[in-house]
Structures are given as C-alpha cells and as structure tokens.
Image: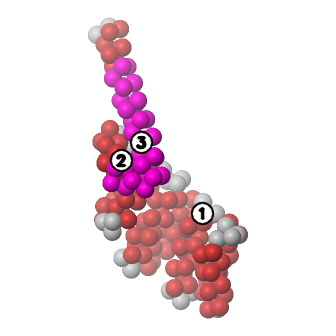
Amino acid sequence: TGPIGTNSSLTIQFVAMSRLSNLLAQLETAMSLNQFEHAERIAREVVQLDRSTPGAWKAIGFICFRRDALDAAFDAFTTAASLVPADPEPAYFLGLIHRKRSEWSSAETRFRQALSVNPDFFRGLLALGRLLRERGSAQAAIPYLARAVAVSPGNVDALSAFGVALRDV
C-alpha cells in the first residue's frame, strides 16, 4: 500500500471526524432547544462513532434522568465521569440519582466529589447544602449554602435554602 492507501485512510478518517463534528453541533442545538428525543438519537449515534465523547454521554444521562430511567442515566453519567474527571456535572447528576433512590450517604459523597472538582460549582453547593439540612444537619449545611449565595447572589433558591438552614440552627 503506497500513497493511495494512505490517502484513502486519511479521507475515511476526515469524513468520520466531519460527521462526528456535525453530530455534536446538532446535539448541542437539540439540547438547547429542549428537543430531547431528537437529542438522544443524535447522542446515541455519536457514541456509536466514538465512545469517548463525554458530551454525548452527559446528554444521554440527562435525558434518561428526566425520564426517570435512573439505571441508564447512572451508567451514562458514570461513563462521562470516567472520561472527564475534571467536570463536576456527572458527579452532581450521580448524586441526584442517589438522592432519588434515597441513598443519602452516596448522594452526599457524589455532591462532595463534584465540589472537589470545582468548589464553586453552584448546583453542587446547593444540592449538598439542601441534603445536609434535610438530613438534620442544618449547621453543616450553612457553609455550603452560604457559598452558593456568594457564587450566585441573586438566586432565590440559594437565598431561600440558606434562610431555612439558618432558621433550623
């Protein structure tokens, strides 16, 4: 195989990369427009082309989570977390899944994991603070909820959760 084989191989790789790039753009658009069924089809096609695409796994996880398909969401977010350990979102959603399953300790661990990646991750701060307060540890919740308020000062949910925790102490 001379130069022709090499060029053919490069052409195939280029076409595959172009297709993947196009699908990822379509996926982003479908997700932003809340077209979740369409987004899921695209995301599943993306992972068939390249299983190491974390955005597609996160999209599948989010869509499955919205449908209460918790096992499928768990698998997708676990894959995404392994692909991008520096992204707090998969750990956060894994925490939400554990919370829905009343697995309090595992939920707390996952929320803390998200915050270890990004200490200012608003949704992780709020989720961990709420979980701690609801589990009877209002005092332990206050630093997380205070940080959530500092990260997003006008957020009504954070202000409300912080106020409730202060009242419960």
Q: Which residue is mark 3?
A: 26
Label 3: element kind: helix
Displayed quadrant of residue 62: bottom left
Query: Alpha-carbon distance for marks 2 and 1?
Result: 25 Å
Front in this rendered view, residue 40 or 166: 40
Q: Residues within 10 Å of mark 1 (few under 14, many from 20)?
A: many
The image shows residue 167 at horizontal and vertical percentages of 65, 91
Q: Is 16 in front, or is 157?
A: 157
17 is higher (above) or lower (below) than 34: above
Residue at numbered disc 2: 43
Q: Secondary structure at mark 1?
A: loop
Q: Main secondary structure of the magenta part?
A: helix
Magenta stretch contains residue 138? no
Residue labelled with disc 1: 121
Q: Earlier in the sequence, mark 2 or mark 1?
A: 2
**Is residue 106 among what the camera can see?**
no
Kind of residue at disc 3: Gln
Q: Amino acid at mark 1?
A: Phe
Amino acid on which disc 2 is placed: Ala
Pinpoint residue 101: horizontal percent, then vertical percent: 36, 76
Q: Which residues are magenta?
A: 10-39
- Quarter of the image for the N terminus: give it: top left
Q: Quadrant of residue 24?
A: top left
Q: Secondary structure at mark 2?
A: helix
Marks 3 and 1 close (CB-CB < 8 Å): no
Residue 136 location in percent, x, y?
A: 53, 89
Label 3 to label 1: alpha-carbon separation: 27 Å
Q: Residue furthest bottom?
A: 168
Q: How is the image coloured?
A: secondary structure
Marks 2/1 in contact by CB < 8 Å: the verdict is: no
